[in-house]
Image (tube, rainbow, N blue to C red):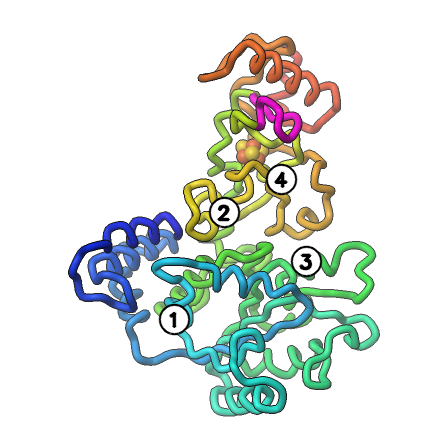
């Protein structure tokens, strides 16, 4: 919820208001209400979420790192005001995290086993990274044990399991062909209980916060889709909330990086944008706190489908995808339709793009094909 956080930080400046976890009280309650709405809960659940955040009871969390780049943790830590990482780290008792804890070696191992023993059946297990399974998992070892054996040992003792990032969700980059280490995601190994997956490369820290808040407030898992992803975060296509969608609908596409269409902020479909096949809330939640375009498409890069197994790290970056949501209008080859701020050259480009899309045999929808036939 960066937009929310931006609002919070702006409104809080210069105001003398009691603070809750570093946030002005009024803004904190507003944040909780908006969080309830984004989770699909009644707005009056905002107070329950506020009570959860301010509760003294902090659920123990064991955060293990396997085969990964630590990008999800980095993403979490790169949050700025009012510091989502503080909200998360204040909310939980992070008993074990190789990246964040001060202890190392035998001390860290001791902390892990102590927490498991004292909190069996109560702790949340967060897994970051894929699990190599080939050759008995020898390609990732921690403290002399394979990631596979560590996961199989800890997972049955957890109250809930969260696989954060695409690697933990299904294998991510490491599982790309030819997948030399037999990398798998948590749900492929832990099959006898639900695993919440939060794919993304990196995963959105806001989705982790929302998931943890949901679980702690309602004492149950949020509604998940068939891939274990919370529906509140992964229930819609990126394409459906994308700010470039009007350009898609009008048939205005960037053809090359840096061309007129790209500079004008037109749709990146022709550059291989996987938004029409990818479910995630990136256009709504954004990443970090660096302005309204803080997500890949917002910065001019096509979505590469990192939240979808079989798309991110599998389909080549520039390969176009099927669109299940056709443009409402589509310019005729030669360009007869002009959008706002679109000059004759731009119209010509749109026409060329339209022609290129059609002649290249890119799969478009039935409606689009009918449009083509009629034109
Ligand atoms: S194809 Fe990509 S850039 Fe174009 S509207 Fe859809 S998500 Fe946005």
| Label 1 residue near ligand 1, CB within 8 Å | no
Q: Quadrant of ligand 1?
A: top right
Q: In the drawing, does residue 309 fall left or right of residue 262?
A: right
Gap between marks 1 and 2, in whole Å?
24 Å
Whole-percent x, y for residue 192 in the image: 62, 73
Q: Which residue is labeled 3 in the image?
A: 172
How would you rate the neighbour count of disc 2 (Cα within 10 Å): few for under 14, some for 14-19, many for 20 or more? many
Mark 1 lies on a secondary structure that is: helix
Residue at horizontal 61 percent and vertical 38 percent from the top: 302
Identify the image quadrant of the C terminus.
top right
Whole-percent x, y for residue 203 in the image: 54, 57
Q: Is residue 215 visible?
A: yes
| Nearest to the observer: residue 113 or residue 8 | 8
Residue at horizontal 51 percent and vertical 39 percent from the top: 298
Gap between marks 4 and 1, in whole Å?
34 Å
Magenta stretch: helix, strand or loop mostly = loop
The tag on residue 274 is 4
Residues at circles 1 and 2 in contact by the CB criterion of under 8 Å? no
Q: Which residue is labeled 1 in the image?
A: 216
Does 139 appear in magenta?
A: no
Gap between marks 1 and 3, in whole Å?
28 Å
Figure quadrant of residue 209: bottom left
Residue at horizontal 23 percent and vertical 54 percent from the top: 13
Start-end of magenta stretch: 252-262
Residues at circles 4 and 1 in contact by the CB criterion of under 8 Å? no
In the rendered view, tell whether residue 131 sits above or below residue 58. above
């Amino acid at each position: 919820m960066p937009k929310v956080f931006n609002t919070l930080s702006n409104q809080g400046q210069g105001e003398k208001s009691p603070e809750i976890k570093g946030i002005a009280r009024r803004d904190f309650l507003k944040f909780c209400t908006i969080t309830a709405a984004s989770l699909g809960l009644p707005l009056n659940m905002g107070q329950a979420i506020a009570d959860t955040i301010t509760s003294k009871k902090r659920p123990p969390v064991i955060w293990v790192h396997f085969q990964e780049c630590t990008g999800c943790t980095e993403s979490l830590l790169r949050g700025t005001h009012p510091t989502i990482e503080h909200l998360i780290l204040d909310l939980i008792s992070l008993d074990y995290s190789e990246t964040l804890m001060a202890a190392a070696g035998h001390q860290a191992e001791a902390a892990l086993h102590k927490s498991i023993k004292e909190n069996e059946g109560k702790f949340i297990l967060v897994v970051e990274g894929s699990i190599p399974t080939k050759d008995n998992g020898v390609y990732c070892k921690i403290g002399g044990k394979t990631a596979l054996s560590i996961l199989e040992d800890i997972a049955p003792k957890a109250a809930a399991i969260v696989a954060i990032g695409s690697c933990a969700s299904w294998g991510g980059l490491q599982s790309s062909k030819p997948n030399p280490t037999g990398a798998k995601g948590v749900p492929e190994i832990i099959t006898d209980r639900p695993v919440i997956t939060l794919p993304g490369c990196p995963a959105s820290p806001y989705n982790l916060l929302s998931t943890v808040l949901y679980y702690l407030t309602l004492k149950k898992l949020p509604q998940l889709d068939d891939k274990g992803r919370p529906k509140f975060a992964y229930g819609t296509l990126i394409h459906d909330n994308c700010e470039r969608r009007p350009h898609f609908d009008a048939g205005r596409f960037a053809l090359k990086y840096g061309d007129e269409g790209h500079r004008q902020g037109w749709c990146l479909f022709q550059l291989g944008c996987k938004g029409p096949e990818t479910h995630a809330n990136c256009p709504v939640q954004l990443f970090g706190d660096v302005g309204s375009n803080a997500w890949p498409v917002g910065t001019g890069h096509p979505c590469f489908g990192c939240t979808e197994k079989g798309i991110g790290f599998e389909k080549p970056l520039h390969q176009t995808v099927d669109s299940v949501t056709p443009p409402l209008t589509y310019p005729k080859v030669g360009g007869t339709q002009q959008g706002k701020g679109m000059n004759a050259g731009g119209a010509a480009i749109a026409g060329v793009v339209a022609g290129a899309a059609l002649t290249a045999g890119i799969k478009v929808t039935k409606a689009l094909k009918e449009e083509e036939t009629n034109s």
